[in-house]
Image: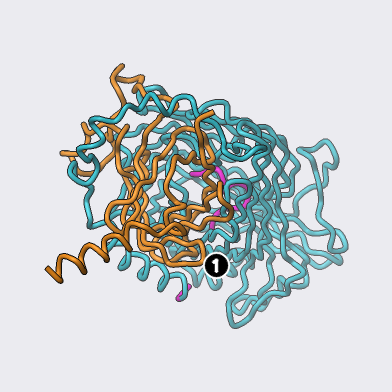
Chain colours: A cyan, B orange
Amino acid sequence: MQIIEFIAPKKTAGLIVALLCAATTSLRAQTDKPQTPADTLTPQVEEEDYSQYDNVGFAAEGAKRYCSPKIEGLSPAKLISLGYDYQMGYNIKADTFRRAGGFPAIMPDSANVLTSNGMRFGCNIPVISRTNLVWQMGANYWEQRYKFEDPGALKSPLLTSLSEYGLRTMGINTTLFKPLDDVKFLLFQGSADLSGDYQFGKFMPLKYTKYSAALIYGKRTSEKKQWGVGLARTYRVGELNYIPIIFYNSTDVANKWGTEILFPARAHVRRTINSRNMLFAGYELEGQSYRLWRSNDQTGFNLRNEDAEIRRGEIRLRAVYEFSLKDFIWMSIQAGYRINARYDVDRLSGGKEIYRAFGLASDAPYVMVNPLTNPLYFNISINLVSP
Amino acid sequence: MLLVLVAGVLTAFVQQNPEADRLMGVWEPSNGRARVKIEKIGAKYYGKFVWLKEPIDPATGQPKTDKNNPDPSMKNVPLKGYRMLKDFVYKGNNEWADGTIYDPLNGSTYSCTIKMTNANTLDIRGYIGVSALGRTDIWKRMVVK
């Protein structure tokens, strides 16, 4: 829940697992040396007059201070994350599929999903991490598999595709934090995600990649507060939108309560039990636009010819517990309620996105409007956190 | 007698290494929240907090202590005077390594290397396991004005 995970949903493999293990192993050595009073205070410390350090200045002319990307009390940034997401049962009503080219429509269908679940993997590795510039590159992989109550009875090609292939998102992202001085900063994040019903052996063309970005101008007004405003291009509610964003992180005087907000993408209240145990309550908007790419084996219907994409957006009301398992290895456990905002299908117009701007720019109808009931969900992840 | 002489010569050699001793002095991290005095003890270099921008803990009204240390016996140790850089050894080429840096904000200790980019500037890199998983901060030398 740090400053750098913004627009694209965090979502990637063996090398990273190896890095995680290597880091864990080597950390043990460095952190099993507890600092003891004898280590930290020497006899001369008690005698030293610290007031002599009040009136000192930079030795070099022109030295400049820069604000940090973090504030006191903020939850630690995740360098590597491996998780599993599990939604309990719900119902999905697949709308009539109005086909292109005057072909007969496919009748609606309704089915119960017993569970939908999948692995979530992400990493954010610092490329440049200096006082005056932080640049990170990341990769992610999310999957969502659908287990239907009676998969053999499914008639809608949308549902059979979900049952057979599920949905995947794979992408890369980059984050730049540029402090302008000791208070002001700029923050940029961009991501490129390939989302659809593809499988690794039957990959989807890269031309279906979706690009998201955000730029924030902010101020770190104290050690315990930072805020910012900006603009984002996002698919968080499924379809493309350009929206203003507000960024606000704070921690109270006693370091017990705080907020971690990137509105409207997410907002959480933080309760710090201690620096290695934190509770959060709030919400996150999750979503993406998924290309329907696979031919459907069960119905013989070729979704690829329909130039169609699922606009998936959901609100996750949740409680999260994050804690240190051992040093820099943290675990995150969350439970909540998944509220469907949109699971509709758009047909692109000659390959072009339909930009609706919440109905202001276009009122083009979706080719399928698919209501989902709302289940409880759970998510667990293990994370290597940043210094 | 010979041993004493050899020890004396070695000690003198260890204690007088002008190139390595350039690290000694008072330094300020980029955020300006603290000042750290780096000293030499034996052949190694150590740094302790000597100045804090906010020395009083607003929650208690008392001088800040190492309250985030996972070791309960350390939580009441004053931060001022706290040795947060430890065990650095000069490796040549303006670099000190094999040390650790302690972050009192989260009670974590990281592997650390120090690179002197010029006489008044240090690149302090704390990292987890491998250097790639880390963060570099720039520290500036402070002098009495």
Measured as percent of width and height from the top left, residue A22 is found at 36, 70
Find numbered disc 1 in the image and state the secondary structure of the residue it sits on. loop
In the depicted structure, whether residue A174 falls above or below residue A65:
below
Viewer-nearest residue: A46 or A146: A46
Quick one: label 1, few (<14), some, or many (20+) residues within 10 Å? many
Name the main secondary structure of what is drawn in magenta: loop
Image-based side of A60 in relation to A304, left or right: left
- Is A29 located above or below residue A186 in the figure? below
The percent coordinates of residue A105 (x first, y second) are 75, 62
**Magenta segment: does it hold A6?**
yes
Residue A85 seen in the current view: no
Chain for numbered disc 1: A
Residue that appears at 83% across and 36% down: A360
In terms of image quadrants, where is residue A271? top left
Identify the magenta region. Answer: A1-14
Q: Amino acid at mark 1?
A: Gly
For image coordinates 46% across by 70% down, the residue present is A16
The part of the image, by quadrant, that contains residue A266 is: top right
Q: Residue at x 73, y 46 (%)?
A: A233
Q: Nearer the viewer, residue A56 or B108?
A: A56
x then y, percent, for residue A227:
60, 30
Q: Position of residue A228 (x, y in %)?
A: 64, 32
Residue A93 vertical placement versus B145 (above, below): below
Q: Which residue is mark 1?
A: A166
Q: Is residue A263 magenta-colored?
A: no
* Residue sitting at the far bottom: A201
